[in-house]
Image (spheres, coloured by chain):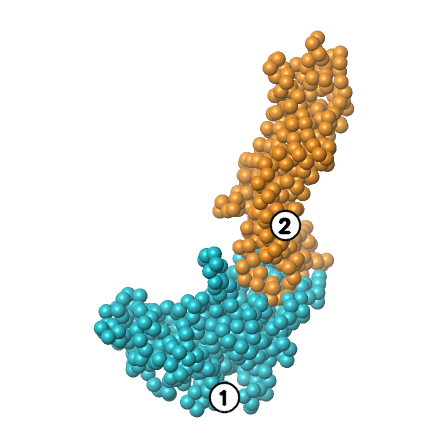
Amino acid sequence: MSMIPDITGGAGDTAAELAVEAGEPVPVGRKIIQGRSPFQLAWERLRTDKAAIVSMAVIAAIVIMALMAPLIAAWIGHGPNQQFIDIGENANGGPVAPNGTFWLGTDSSGRDLFVRIVYGARVSLSVGVLATLISIALGVVFGLAAGYLGGIVDVVIARVIDIMLAIPFLVLAISIATILHPSFWLVIFVVGILSFTYPARIVRGQVISLKEKEYIQAARALGAGPFRIMFIDLLPNVIAQVIVYGSLLIPASIVLEATLSFLGVGIPPPTADWGQMISDASGYYQYGYWWYLLFPSLALLITTLAFNILGDSVRDALDPRGGGLYV
Amino acid sequence: MNDVKTVPAQAADTTEGDVLLRVENLVKYFPVKSSGFLKPREFVHAVEDVSLAVRRGETYGIVGESGCGKSTLGRSIARLHDITSGRIVFDGQDISKLSQRRMRPLRREIQMIFQDPIGSLNPRRRVGSIIGDPFAIHHTASGTERRRRVQELMERVGLNPEHYNRFPAEFSGGQRQRIGVARALAFQPKLIICDEPVSALDVSIQAQVVNLLADLQAEFGLTYIFIAHDLSVVRHVSNTVGVMYLGKLTETAPADTLFTVPRHPYTGALLSAVPLPDPDQSAQRKQIVLVGDVPSPIAPPSGCRFHPRCPKAAPVCVTDDPVLEPQLGDGPDHLAACHLPMAEGESLADFKPTIGAEERVIEPEGVLAEDVLPGGKPAGGDAGTGSASPGSGSIGAVPTTREGGQA
């Protein structure tokens, strides 16, 4: 029996679980009684939620599409930045409507709109996920530190958050992006760093109420240091809220990235990006080039909607009693 | 009844004995958020000038009403609070000024068991991980070794070691308290501070946990500080008992002495609230029920803190703070802080306070106000309406006066 118990983790006793599920021999005549972790219970609730299943399927499709973008481009035979000046532009040099060659039409430079939308999913998803990871990581660390350590640490962090919340988000993001020259990684960091304030506040508020609990006193009485208490005792108790908030932060980050690109301070051209396409298309829409505006917007809408519905389901699954998220 | 007590042989012959823990003039104030600009900062006087000594191997019971500072005292001794002033000497070492970091090695020797069997266990962590915490924190065992020792502990406190992977919510209250005991026991500490360990449990489960604690004490030679508000439990487990009122230790004595010859009127009133199993005895007894509520610990009364509610209160009680010392020829181990201690067999019901009405607590129903004579003399503490429950031996739920069980 090579079972090494994971003493530290809340949901991490997978070694034992796997052993049981794999039908490995359990110690002589003994049956391991396995408590189900809150996340196992949440996953079971999530599995029975139809909206969650549908949105997960949609997200999976978008992710597969983004991952296979080069294959799709090769299969169609149109590169994402390849201009078709002869067949991709009409007599006036405008976009061509959807047809057999260009399934969703072309853009103002005679490029295949479908291939560019597929490539745009890569940017949107990676910015959405990476920026969310950054803001969640920062939010957890600062929220735990402010909430548990209190005192001057709390004052400084809380004031920084207040200041950041007082400045309009877009103004700050545009200023930073303009000064530092737009790039893919800059967009991720700007979006990630600027949106850490809400998870930090959620974690801080939770920790302030949790740290009065007797089990935190018990950990202190055992001699646990502040880092152990923050990350081993407190974090598992706030992680559900963090996951819920994170799942809603992904679509928000995607929209924010699209917004920055729309305004010309996001992903620099010629990289395919939904916000940029929508921005470009808005100048052509009035002349009847509807597909150019419609399809990138639909891509953005479907992606964010799927993430939002999934986020709602995740919240319901993790917190069946409802409420208590936006404290 | 007293069979679970384990009086250590070496401590029995001398009064000083082998002192494991000595608390000297411990004071703990908590700041209160000031209610206005430029107002003086106020403090809750949670523990005020408490001194006590706990001998190795004994159980020191601390009783008192809710909010009297007994839990704060326990947590201050465990250095979960920084103390305001005073000294805590544990095993010959002054720990009152140690930083949390330097305190850490000593955490192995002073452990706590908490009141709330739900709140004291992290709901998001598995039981094996919770009981294994002491080993993880002090890096003494890991992997399979840690698991083995955790399961030994679980077995020792009467839990099924196979429930290692369960979450606290999957256990009953009594089992959860056993988990707390197992965690406290991991390092076989010298001192365990039990902060109302059985108050949240059913009576039948209380007995199991109390007996478990007694067995463990006998097996490992543990010393307990046993904080409770249930007098019968405290009498059952304790060698020495200290009574607290509003942050001060009012009386301390060997358990049997305290329960038979209380000196402080507050102790007397508490004891009269303990239900007696014999209904005839119960009917004969006069139950002394204190008037009013405990005064605010932010601005405690002058002199003796008990004087506004004391049936024997005299002018000296308002002006002078009594010293904790032997009374009426008691031995050095029976101390009470009282100007007018009770003689043996004396009944508090026969007394009327001899202090002005403005010093007295007025009864909530205003009954006392009717009885106050024009001269301002109070009619005393026997004018209640009898709305109190004669039941539980707990303290604090007895707001009005009541005569001998209404028999």
Residue drawn at the location 60% of the way across and 15% of the way down: A286
Letter of the chain that mark 1 sits on in the rendering? B
For residue B370, the mark is none
Viewer can see residue B303:
yes
Instruction: Specify few, some or many for label 1: CA neighbours under 10 Å numbering under 14, 14-19, or 20 or more.
Output: few
Nearer-the-camera pick, B208 or A212: A212
Residue drawn at the location 47% of the way across and 72% of the way down: B247
Residue drawn at the location 66% of the way across and 21% of the way down: A280
Find out whether the residues at labels 2 and 1 contact each other: C-beta distance under 8 Å: no
In this figure, which residue is indicated by the disc labeled 1?
B332
The colour chain A appears in is orange
The colour chain B appears in is cyan
Nearer-the-camera pick, B166 or B48: B48
Place of residue A316 in the rendered image (x, y in percent of width and height, measured from the top left): 53, 42
Instruction: Specify few, some or many for label 2: CA neighbours under 10 Å numbering under 14, 14-19, or 20 or more.
Output: many
**Left or right position of B201 against A282:** left
In this figure, which residue is indicated by the disc labeled 2?
A142
